[in-house]
Amino acid sequence: MADGQNILCTGGSGLLGTALRKRWPGAWFPASADFDITRPEAMEAWATGKDIRCVFHAAAFTSPPKVDQDPLRAMEVNIVGTAHVARFCAARGCRLVYVSTDYVFRGDTGNYREEDPVHPVNRYAWSKLGGECAARLYANALIVRTTFGPEPFPYEKAFIDQWTSRETVSAIAAKLARLAESEVTGVLHVGGPRRTVYDYARSCAGGKDIGRLSVHDVAFAVPADTSLDCSRYDRELAAGAVKAP
């Protein structure tokens, strides 16, 4: 599956999906209207005659403020839709890679390991955790908690009091592509070094000045420190279970 052959990627028009298109010229990236994860019959119709060996599930309703406004849509897409994807994979015996978020953690300690307790602080993260529950019921599944952003950093300001393991989407896409081609299952954290969102933004701002912003300046709940312990990924890489990006 080195060029993405036999891989179906949902969310192909999103930030991560766009980056993966460059790495997987042989993969399928169906439009959401064609492979509608909220309609199992549409998923089955699209898949007829295709040899799908891995589903990389990146499609999601991702904006925390918009999820607060329309939580039922988040339930339909992020929870029920992911359950449909897991059943789709189970029916074919194919691999599932589910892209989750660092926001499943409360954010009061940071440096979270895969086995640490989860406790989302906003509805978006609760909906992604619901998707994790569906994926965990399928044995041949990998749940990846990660965080990434576009290049260059697109906003005028960044949080000085929120800590993260965020990396650019190209860096994360390189790691996740290799994970999809591996046989690693369970839960895995993927990210970079612990730093503030402001420091991350400055590292990929393309020379633009970045203003300072506090988590207390926004109307939605933001966890203070969702940095990830990514040592399991490093161990899998060292053991050869995952090829170096």
Image: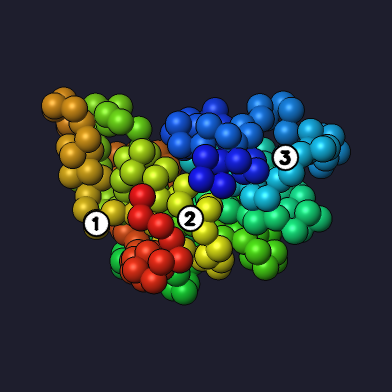
Residue at position x 35%, y 55% in the image: 244
Q: Is residue 71 in view?
A: no
> Mark 3 highlights which residue?
37
> Is residue 205 positioned above or below 144 on the image?
above
Which numbered disc, 3 or 2, marks the residue that appears first in the sequence?
Answer: 3
Q: Secondary structure at mark 2?
A: helix
Mark 3 Cα within 10 Å, few/some/many (few <14, many 20+)? many
Q: Secondary structure at mark 3?
A: loop
Rendered location of residue 187, percent (x, y): 51, 65
Dividing the picture into quarters, in which one does residue 113 lie? bottom left
Q: Which mark is residue 84?
A: none
> Mark 1 highlights which residue?
193
Rendered location of residue 202, percent (x, y): 17, 37
Rendered location of residue 102, percent (x, y): 42, 55
> The residue under label 3 is which amino acid type?
Ile
Q: Could you tell whether 109 is left or right of 242 in the image?
A: left
> The residue under label 2 is which amino acid type?
Leu
> The residue under label 1 is which amino acid type?
Pro
Q: Is residue 209 in view?
A: yes
Rendered location of residue 53, percent (x, y): 68, 50
Q: Secondary structure at mark 1?
A: loop
Residue at position x 78%, y 54% in the image: 92
Which numbered disc, 3 or 1, marks the residue that appears first in the sequence?
Answer: 3
| Residue contact at pointers 3 and 2, CB within 8 angstroms | no
> Mark 2 highlights which residue?
179
123 or 227, which is in the foreground?
A: 227
